[in-house]
């Protein structure tokens, strides 16, 4: 399976560059010049990144990766784990999934700036799926077929242990970032199967609720969050089957 960048990714940066050029051509004044130069710089930076060579192939022998910072063939024996993960939401907005690799001993893939979501092993981010045409589920299917036991779909693992809550945003609700962090910690602890992580997540939720969850002008529904945290704590208490 070969991944491809989405068509249309160049449209917005091109518009920024062209708008900046037009402003420089017809406009006068310091503010207009600064805005024009800013648009050209921003659009040019994004264009440069989008036009860099890219190739990502998943097959029976491993991965072929060509992107900034990593250009080589990576065989499956060079990897201890390959994880399709989805970072925690940002201000309630879902983040794009990413593909992480835990290198086998002696394998160098670049700086390990990430972590395995469930066992905290150092990991290298191979791919951010934002801007990729193929869906995360298509990639997951290819990795499950070719990588075997090395592959973990962290999104599916989380869903299997505790459903992803869908909170309504309301006036004077709980702060979105605080709730997202608590829910993420609890779901990761459940998915890890580690008793210590489960106890730590439960204690963190209990502490946050005892001191009172912070509220915001617009936040998650108080009733929905309270019900979800009750269910999450109950799941964390329950012994794994």
Image: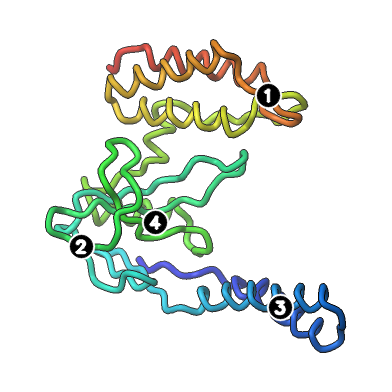
Residue named by callout 3: 37
- Relative to 157, is 101 above or below? below
- Local crowd size for mark 2, using a 10 Å CA cut-off: few (<14), some (14–19), many (≥20): few
In front: mark 3 or mark 2? Answer: 3
Whole-percent x, y for residue 140 in the image: 37, 51
Residue named by callout 1: 215
State the CA–CA distance, disc 4 to disc 3.
Answer: 39 Å
| Residue at the spot 69% in from the left edge and 79% down from the top edge | 17
- Relative to 139, is 74 above or below? below
| Residue at the spot 46% in from the left edge and 78% down from the top edge | 52
Q: Is residue 143 left or right of residue 38?
A: left
- Relative to 104, is 55 above or below? below
- Dot 4 or dot 2: first in sequence order is 2
- The kind of secondary structure element at disc 2 is loop
State the CA–CA distance, disc 4 to disc 2.
Answer: 23 Å
- Tell me which corner region of the image, top left, top right, bottom left or bottom right, holds residue 37: bottom right
Q: Say the numbered circle drawn on residue 139.
A: 4
State the CA–CA distance, disc 1 to disc 4.
Answer: 38 Å
Whole-percent x, y for residue 39 in the image: 70, 74
- Dot 2 or dot 1: first in sequence order is 2
């Amino acid at each position: 399976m070969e991944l491809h960048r989405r068509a249309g990714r160049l449209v917005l940066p091109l518009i920024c560059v062209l708008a900046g050029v037009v402003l420089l051509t017809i406009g006068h004044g310091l503010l207009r010049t600064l805005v024009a130069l800013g648009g050209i710089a921003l659009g040019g930076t994004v264009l440069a990144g989008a036009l860099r060579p890219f190739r990502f192939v998943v097959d029976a022998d491993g991965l072929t990766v060509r992107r900034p910072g990593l250009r080589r063939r990576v065989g499956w024996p060079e990897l201890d784990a390959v994880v399709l993960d989805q970072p925690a939401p940002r201000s309630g907005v879902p983040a794009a999934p990413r593909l992480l690799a835990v290198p086998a001993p002696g394998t160098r893939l670049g700086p390990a700036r990430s972590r395995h979501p469930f066992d905290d092993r150092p990991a290298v981010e191979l791919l951010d799926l934002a801007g990729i045409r193929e869906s995360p589920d298509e990639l997951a299917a290819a990795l499950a077929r070719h990588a075997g036991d090395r592959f973990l779909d962290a999104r599916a693992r989380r869903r299997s242990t505790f459903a992803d809550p869908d909170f309504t945003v309301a006036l004077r609700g709980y702060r979105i970032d605080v709730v997202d962090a608590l829910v993420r910690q609890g779901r990761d602890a459940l998915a890890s199967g580690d008793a210590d992580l489960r106890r730590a997540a439960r204690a963190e939720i209990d502490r946050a609720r005892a001191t009172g969850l912070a509220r915001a002008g617009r936040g998650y529904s108080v009733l929905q969050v309270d019900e979800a945290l009750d269910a999450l704590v109950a799941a964390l208490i329950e012994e794994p089957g």
